[in-house]
Every structure is written in C-alpha cells, then in structure tokens.
Image (cartoon, helix red, strand yellow):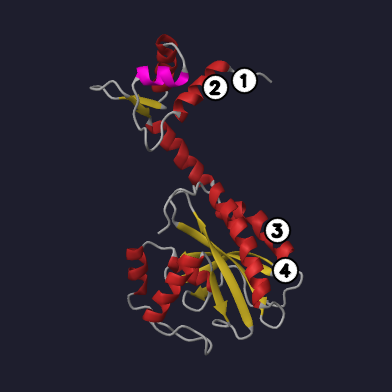
Amino acid sequence: MPIIQSVERALRILDLFDEQTPELKITEMSSMMNLHKSTLHSLLLTLKTYGYIDQDAESGKYRLGTKLLERGQMLLQSLDIRAVARKSLEALSRQTGQTTHLVVLEGREGVYIDKVEGEKAAIRYSRIGRRVPLHTSAVGKVLAAYLREHERERLLEGYRFVPHTPNSIQDAAAFREELAKVRQAGFALDNEENEPGVRCAAVPILDHAGKVAAAMSVSTMVSVVDEGQLRQFVDLMKQHAQMISRQLGYREQEENP
C-alpha cells in the first residue's frame, strides 16, 4: 500500500528532535527536510494542535510536545516484563537444556517471577514466588550490582550475610568486590554458594532508563555442566537479555550504573 505523504512528513518532523537537538527553528527544519516553510508550517500547526509539538512563545522555536511523553508512559506501563521475556526464557532453555529463570528485586531479596524447566535439568528447588538471597545467588548479585551506587549502599546497610554453603560470601567488603567484578564482566556466577552441587549464571535486563529491571539466569548441576559450557550459556543469555532490554526501551548508548 502507498505511504501517505503528509503522515510521513509529520513523523519525519518528530524524528528531527533528539538529545542534541531539543529545539529547532522552522527555517532549520525547512532546510533539513527540504520542504517549503508554508508546507512545514501547516504540518507543525496540526502537530501542535494535538500536543505532539510545542512552541516557545519567546524564541518561536519548536520542541516535542508532552503528548509524546504521555503516550510513551502508556507504552511503558503496558510492557509486562514476564510477557516480553517469556520467549527468550523458552528459547534459552531449549538451547541449553537447562532451567531458566526471571528474577526481580523486592526489598533485599530476589523473587522468581517466571521459570522454564529444561529437558536436561535435574534442579527442582526453584519455583515462581520463591525468594533468594542477594549475596548467595547469581541473580541476586546482578540485581545488586546494577543498582545506582546510592541505592546499592542503602541496600547494604544492615544486610545480613547468612552463609548457605561454605562458598557463600559472608561480609560486605567481599560482596562489594564481587559486585564490581559483575559489573565489569556483565554477568554473575553462583559457584555452589546457595545450594551444594548447583552452579548458576545470570545477566542483567535493563529498562528504558538504563536501570536493572530483572535478572535472567540458567541453573546447572556442577556434575553435569562444566565451566566452559556455562560460559557458553552466558554468551547466549547476554544475547537474549539484550533483545529483552531493547524491547523495554533500553538503548546501547545509555551509560550503565
């Protein structure tokens, strides 16, 4: 079907604005779009009437209108991270044969909000709604590592480092050091720190603001999956996490915490 020219031009006007160019004069837009000012003025008036374009009364410059913010918030609210991530969890489980999880931060714990059982998985301890400590789990480390620094420090105030196995981190200094490694590597490992014989890996999922929205993980048995295989799983997880993050509005150029 043919493209409607007036609609295309209106959308092109909106695309002229970005972080580096928040405001434009009509003469600048006319030059950038190679459109006569009279044609452009009619389009701008229509967009302005419906709130998609605003105009500064003193300078006469145009900028994006609040209607776009309103529509953007509606879109963000409609994005259910479980629905967005489900296909990736299923695909990752098929690719690895292992159980995959989606975990969010609630208070000072991680909470499983979705999981897909793997065909080769022997692990059955996890369930949707189960809580997991931050310091002993790969997902918990990711959720803590990608918080803003002041949020992370507030979380650590009075945090109790209860050991679950001899491998568990048992103090704040060691935990901070571990979280720095997680941010540098882009993933976290739980090397029999939460359950004996169980090794997990997790990666962050980021939202439109570049904040951690959830952690995605793969759980394995040490006796079945070696470290080399687990690192291959990490690479697959990173690919899926990037896809989910983009669907949530995250853009690569945003700085990580």
Answer with mark 2 or mark 1, whichever residue precedes in sequence. Answer: 1
Inspect the image, locate mark 2, and give the three-letter code of the amino acid beneath it: Glu
Question: Residue 194: which quarter of the image?
Answer: bottom right
The residues colored magenta run 26-33
Question: Residue 120: which quarter of the image?
Answer: bottom right
Q: Residue at x 41, y 37 (%)?
A: 69
Q: Do the residues labelled 1 and 3 touch (CB within 8 Å)?
A: no
Residue at the spot of label 2: 8
Residue at the spot of label 4: 118
The Cα–Cα distance between marks 3 and 2, rounded to whole angstroms, is 36 Å
Q: Which of marks 2 and 4 is in front?
A: 2
Inspect the image, locate mark 1, and give the three-letter code of the amino acid beneath it: Ile
Residue at the spot of label 3: 91
**What is the secondary structure assignment of the residue under circle 4?**
loop
Nearer to the camera, 254 or 68: 254
**What is the secondary structure assignment of the residue under circle 3?**
helix
Answer with mark 4 or mark 3, whichever residue precedes in sequence. Answer: 3
Q: Residue furthest bottom?
A: 166
Q: Position of residue 20 (x, y in %)?
A: 37, 36
Give the quadrant of the N terminus.
top right
The Cα–Cα distance between marks 2 and 4, rounded to whole angstroms, is 46 Å
Q: Where is residue 62 in the image (x, y as percent from the top left)?
A: 34, 24
**What is the secondary structure assignment of the residue under circle 2?**
helix
Q: Is residue 238 rendered magenta in the image?
A: no
Residue at the spot of label 1: 3
Q: Are marks 2 and 4 in contact (CB under 8 Å)?
A: no
Answer with mark 1 or mark 3, whichever residue precedes in sequence. Answer: 1
Q: Which residue is drawn at 43% across and 13% down?
A: 42
* Mark 3 nearby-residue class (10 Å; few <14, some 14–19, many ≥20): some
* Mark 2 nearby-residue class (10 Å; few <14, some 14–19, many ≥20): few
